[in-house]
Amino acid sequence: MKKKHNNHRDTRKRVMRSVQDETAPVLVRDGTATAERNAGAYHVPVMLKECCDALITDPNGTYIDGTLGGGGHTAEILRRLGTGGVVFSFDEDAAAIAEAERRFEEELGKSSPQLMLRHENFSFAHTIQHTIKRDGKPQAQDNITGILLDLGVSSRQLDTGGIGLSYRVNSRLDMRFGSRDGLPVSELIATTQQGVLEQILREYGEEPFARVIAQRIVEVRRVAPVVTTFDLRVIVEECVPPHLRQQSLSRVFQAFRIAVNNELGVLEETLRGIVPRLAKGGRIVVIAYHSLEDRIVKNVFHELSRRSMPINPDDFDTPEAAREAMIKSTTVEVQPQLKILTKKPLTPSDEELFYNYRARSAKVRIAEKT
Ligand SMILES: C[S@@+](CC[C@H](N)C(=O)[O-])C[C@H]1O[C@@H](n2cnc3c(N)ncnc32)[C@H](O)[C@@H]1O
């Protein structure tokens, strides 16, 4: 116990020294300091070195950053690329794309031909088309060398309110990253049955007060529509004792955000969709902040890396043929598509948590195309 405590104190002292010295890099271990510092005002990138070390297997490869946000990971990927490498960076939030256009133009002097910004959902990542010149002739580059998904929201989205992701700032209750498809939270709340609201809060937020909050939402909406973040905040505060309110508010806001963006469905669809387009040895790196997201990554990686699967009787012409096959074995061999590189997820170091507490729930899983 004592040793652990001392270690933590040492780390704390070391980080304090580098924070106090303004000329010292924020991260001392490698050259990622510049990207860290530049992105800091918008969003401090999480596990930057670990993720980029895992992602970049070929400096001249084709990469996807599915979640551009403040561009911290994109900047570091760009920094590590050779002249033949490119990165396609996606974000559904128009403000993130606009900020990245401004930032990268300022940093690079002009927009980089190695950076392609996409104002789209990352579920379209598998559709990217890239052409390279070989022997002076354009040639379609079908394979993707790596994809990074840093799920959730950026600090800027939380801190500025905007689309209503934060209970700390009063704004319209929308929460859609893209604002194009699906319902805003205000409409979801206005039109959804109490039981379904409760289920959303319980499943996506793991909220212990799900039932009373859903009930109160229905009572309130009979009298007046719930249209702002503070309308929802007041409802939660009425249902939860003061010392538990902050956690409940976070969970309730998170639950509605996951629901209106179909975050879990989109994640699973994207992981399954990208695998066929990955080059052999190409990597998928996912940073998840929520146990349900992490479970989806774990399960999809597990399923696509298995070497055998149960026999499906429907695959046989007759029930007799199925029965005969199952007498010999109940499983069939399959070719694995992925190799899991992280048996247990990676988590942030004490050092990182000291300067970026928002990274505390991050879990990184990595898989490689076989
Ligand atoms: C945690 S932030 C990424 C931060 C970024 N890695 C950085 O270092 O600055 C997540 C970003 O992904 C975006 N996002 C979330 N889900 C998305 C989706 N399905 N498609 C596209 N962008 C998405 C959000 O708008 C947000 O800007």
Image: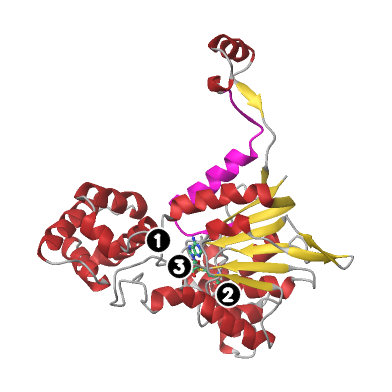
Which callout, 1 or 3, points to the residue nearer the camera? Answer: 1
Q: Tag 3: Cα neighbours inside 10 Å, few (<14), some, or many (≥20)?
A: some
Residue 179 visible? The answer is yes
Q: Which residue is mark 1?
A: 181
Query: Mark 2 sits on what residue?
Result: 71
Ligand 1 has an atom within 8 Å of the beta carbon of the residue at disc 2 = yes
- The alpha-carbon separation of the residues under discs 2 and 1 comes to 24 Å
Residue at left offset 78%, top offset 62%: 58
Q: Nearer the viewer, residue 45 or 8?
A: 45
Q: Position of residue 121 (x, y in %)?
A: 51, 62
Magenta stretch: residue 173 in it? no
- Are there few (<14), some (14-19), or many (20+) residues within 10 Å of tag 2? many
Q: Are marks 1 and 3 in contact (CB under 8 Å)?
A: no
Residue type, mark 2 in image: Gly
Mark 2 or mark 1, whichever is nearer to me = 1
Mark 3 vs ligand 1: CB below 8 Å: yes
Q: Residue at x 27, y 71 (%)?
A: 229
In the image, is residue 269 above or below residue 255? above
Q: Is residue 186 left or right of residue 95?
A: left
Q: Amino acid at mark 1?
A: Asp
* Segment colored magenta: 285-311
Q: Nearer the viewer, residue 79 or 114?
A: 114
Judged from the image, the secondary structure of the residue bearing numbered disc 3 is loop
Residue at (62, 40) in percent of width and height: 304
Display colour scheme: secondary structure
